[in-house]
Every structure is written in C-alpha cells, then in structure tokens.
Image (spheres, helix red, strand yellow):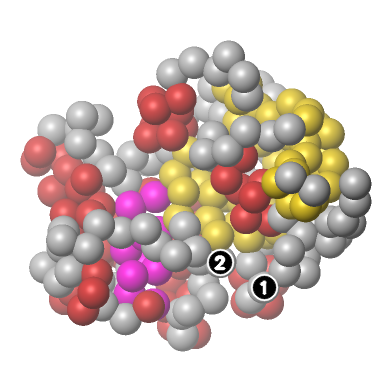
Amino acid sequence: MSRGNHNDGPAIEARGVSKRYGRTVALAPIDLSVARGEFVVLVGPSGCGKSTLVNMLGALERSDTGVIEVAGHRLGRGARHLNHFRRMEVGIAFQLHNLIPRLTARENVQAAMLGAARRRDRVERSEELLDALDLTARANDRPPTLSGGERQRVAIARALANKPPVILADEPTGSLDDDAAELVIDIFKEWCLEGGTVLAVSHDPRLSSAGDRVVTIPVAAEGG
C-alpha cells in the first residue's frame, strides 16, 4: 500500500517559521526538516508552539514568517487548492479529536473519504482501519459514548483514511493505555516503512522512544 511522493525533497520543510497572536509569541522562529519515510516526534514544554506548528503544517493557520513546504506543496499566502491539500496530502489527528458527534465511529472515518473514494471503498477502508485499531466492536457507536482513548483512535483512523503522504498527530497516544498505544505506534511505523511520513507532537515517552528522531522545541519568549 504505497503512498506516492510528490517530489524528491523532504516531506516537510519549515524555514524561519514563526507565529504571534498580538504580543504573544506562539512559536519562535524554527527550522524543521523531515525526510520522506521518517517518524519524528516533537517535544517541548507546554506553550512552546508545538500544536501551532502542526496547524501551520496542515494549512489550518498561516505562519507570520518563513517558508513551509509539505508533500511538495508550498503553503502560505497565494497557496492554491488547499482543500485538496488538507484532504489528500496530509492527515491530521487532533488532540481534541474533532469528531462529528452525530456520526458513528465508522461514519466519522468514512466522512474523510467523501468525494475521494467510492462508497464500497470507503466502507472497506473504514473497516480495515477500525479493525487495525481494535475498534470493530465500537464501529456503530457515536463519539459521546466512546472513551477518550477510543475517540483518539477513531481520530487517528480518520487521519489515515485517504492514505496521505504525511500524517500530523497531536498527542496521539496521551489518552491511551499501553496496548492501545502500541497499536498506534505500530501503525505509524508501518506507515513510514511503506513510504509515508509521520510528525507527532507528544509528551509521551512511549512515543518518543519509538520515533526515528526527537526534535525539541524551546519555549517561546514573550516580547514586544
């Protein structure tokens, strides 16, 4: 199940990227390069900008400075086809899950593939992912009835649904027990072996020890 790469350069490249909200420095200028097929874990104290960086790499926010390229796409002002990019080039597993409450676990995963795959393929792919994440028994249940760890795994399944070349995951194992965390880590490792790339934000030593490389982001300094 190979994931095609769009250029010969890094899967993720950020040069001089920073972000402010008013006078608050959300992310001090940072350089980051992640190779295709690499599993990188971002660590650092709360408030250093890890989640902000993930949002910018996923084209959910714009950086104030610097250059960002992900899966061969340059992001920022003037970037085109961002809806396609967010759907097909990156899969984002949010820390707060962002599942649709009225849809079942299965339907949440299938929703990511609407317009990108036939119904039969959506059903097959969702079943495959939910089984891999030990969620088959909860496939027909809605997010409000799921535990935090189950919701987290559904969010990961949704991120993987379209087989994007880059996965961005914010605290993907923080609410998981050891068995569930091992499932997620194994899936990420397999994803990278098959040509995908994973960048995960985490405070979880289980994830940090499993990655190919750990990158530490220092706390952003306040300033005027």
Please say whether residue 105 is one of the residues in the magenta stretch. no
| Disc 2 element | loop
Start-end of magenta stretch? 149-159
Which quarter of the picture shows residue 219?
A: bottom right
Q: Main secondary structure of the magenta part?
A: helix
Residue at 16% from the left image edge and 40% from the top image edge: 121
Q: Quadrant of residue 148?
A: bottom left
Question: Depth check: 217 or 206 in front?
Answer: 217
- Check disc 1 and report the residue beneath it: 203
Amino acid type, mark 2? Glu
Identify whether 38 is placed above or below 179: above
Work out which quarter of the rendered image holds the N terminus and state it: top left
Task: Describe residue 158's horizontal placement relative to residue 75 as left or right.
Answer: left
Residue 2, can we see it? Answer: no
Mark 1 residue type: His
Q: Is residue 157 above or below residue 153?
A: above
Position of 214 relative to 87 (above/below): below
Residue ID at (83%, 43%): 30
Viewer-nearest residue: 61 or 44: 61
Q: Is residue 76 above or below residue 25?
A: above
Q: Nearer the viewer, residue 49 or 223?
A: 223
Secondary-structure class at tag 1: loop
* Place of residue 133 in the rendered image (x, y in percent of width and height, measured from the top left): 33, 68
Tell me the crowding category of disc 1: few under 14, some 14 to 19, or many 20 or more residues within 10 angstroms, Cα based: some
Report the residue marked by disc 2: 171
Which residue is rendered at x = 32% and y = 81% of the image?
147
Residue drawn at point x = 62 percent, y = 33 percent: 62
Percent x, y for residue 113?
A: 24, 39
Could you say which quadrant of the image residue 140 lies in?
bottom left
| Residue 105, image x, y percentages | 21, 63
Q: Is residue 204 visible in the rendered structure shown here?
A: yes
